Image (tube, helix red, strand yellow):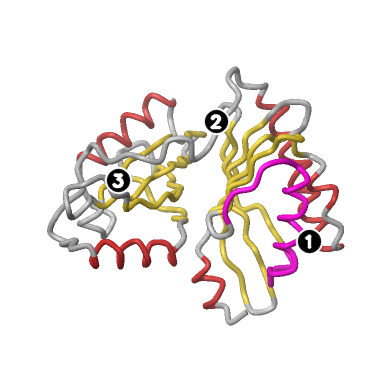
């Protein structure tokens, strides 16, 4: 199932032409990149609103979506959509305050923010190597969540690693990564992380983790860039903090 990459790309294009929308008639969508792995698709999507004044003010929000192709046709089911709901609400409020009208659609010229994230290394490493490195990362993550020792997780990232967390922001360097992990552990109610799925395309990996805590759980999307020799040079964490609050933690 899934077909060749070209077949899936063509099916995605036909599905987009067929409409269906995403429930946001006033928001334009710009897809920065698309990953395809068998019948699974991960897309990085910017949700854009036009400047109501005709100027250059940005009203934009990034997020990811994971789809699964159903059969060999043009139908895709949504596995998960990931974005910061607080930022979405704040952006929409600012847009309305500036005179935004829901009847006005964003134009095709609206794209993402240049330099928001680095590109993966060119020249994909062998898939088997990436799979082994990801398995090692997932094992370390599970052991750290269970035992409380997070240094082994930081050790699989490069010295120059870049981290983009859609809630807490951007940090750079393994020292900053270690501090970011420790701060996140202190704030997080979750004590277990299970891999639901992973998508490998070139040197980029997208994985959905199920984060579980005392009162329930939620799905988190991690995007990783493989840097060879079992290490990772970039990680992006996409989730909705509103879902964390709904768990009552």
Within 10 Å of disc 3 (Cα), the crowding (few <14, some 14-19, many 20+) is: many
Element marked by disc 2: strand
Q: Position of residue 104 (x, y in %)?
A: 14, 55
Query: Distance of mark 3 from mark 1, alpha carbons?
Result: 36 Å
- Report the residue that reaches farthest toward the top: 123
**Structural distance between the alpha carbons of marks 2 and 3:** 22 Å
| Residue 175 falls inside the magenta stretch | yes
Crowding at dot 1, Cα within 10 Å, few <14 / some 14-19 / many 20+, comes out as: some
Residue contact at pointers 2 and 1, CB within 8 angstroms: no
Percent across and percent down for residue 38 are 50, 34
Height in image: 233 above or below 243? above
Report the residue that reaches farthest toward the left: 103
Q: Position of residue 112 (x, y in %)?
A: 37, 40
Q: Earlier in the sequence, mark 2 or mark 3?
A: 3
Which sits in the foreground, 109 or 216?
A: 109
Q: Which residue is mark 3?
A: 29
Are the residues at dot 2 and dot 3 in contact (C-beta closer than 8 Å)?
Answer: no
Q: Is residue 131 left or right of residue 169?
A: right
Residue topped by disc 1: 145
| Tag 3 near tag 1, CB within 8 Å | no
Q: Secondary structure at mark 3?
A: strand
Residue indicated by mark 2? 201
Q: Earlier in the sequence, mark 2 or mark 1?
A: 1
* Magenta-drawn segment: 169-192
For residue 219, which numbered disc appears in the image?
A: none
**Residue beneath the point at 46% across and 53% down:** 79
Callout 1: SS: helix
Q: Looking at the image, which is closer to me, 112 or 213?
A: 112
Q: Residue at x 78, y 39 (%)?
A: 156
> In front here: 244 or 69?
244
């Amino acid at each position: 199932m899934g077909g060749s990459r070209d077949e899936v790309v063509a099916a995605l294009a036909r599905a987009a032409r067929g409409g269906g929308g995403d429930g946001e008639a006033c928001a334009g969508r710009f897809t920065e990149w698309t990953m395809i792995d068998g019948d699974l698709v991960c897309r990085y999507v910017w949700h854009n609103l036009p400047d109501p004044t005709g100027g250059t003010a940005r009203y934009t929000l990034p997020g990811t979506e994971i789809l699964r192709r159903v059969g060999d046709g043009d139908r895709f089911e949504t596995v998960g959509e990931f974005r910061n709901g607080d930022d979405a609400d704040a952006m929409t409020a600012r847009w309305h305050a500036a005179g935004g009208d829901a009847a006005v659609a964003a134009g095709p010229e609206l794209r993402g923010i240049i330099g928001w994230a680095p590109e993966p290394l060119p020249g994909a490493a062998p898939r088997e190597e990436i799979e082994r490195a990801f398995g090692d990362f997932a094992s370390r993550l599970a052991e750290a969540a269970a035992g409380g020792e997070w240094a082994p997780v930081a050790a699989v990232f490069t010295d120059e690693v870049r981290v983009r967390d859609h809630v807490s922001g951007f940090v750079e360097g393994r020292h900053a990564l270690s501090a970011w992990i420790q701060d996140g552990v202190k704030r997080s109610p979750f004590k277990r992380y299970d891999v639901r799925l992973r998508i490998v395309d070139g040197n980029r990996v997208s994985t959905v983790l199920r984060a579980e805590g005392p009162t329930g759980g939620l799905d988190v999307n991690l995007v990783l860039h493989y840097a060879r020799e079992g290490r990772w040079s970039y990680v992006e964490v996409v989730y909705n903090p509103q879902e964390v609050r709904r768990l009552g933690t």
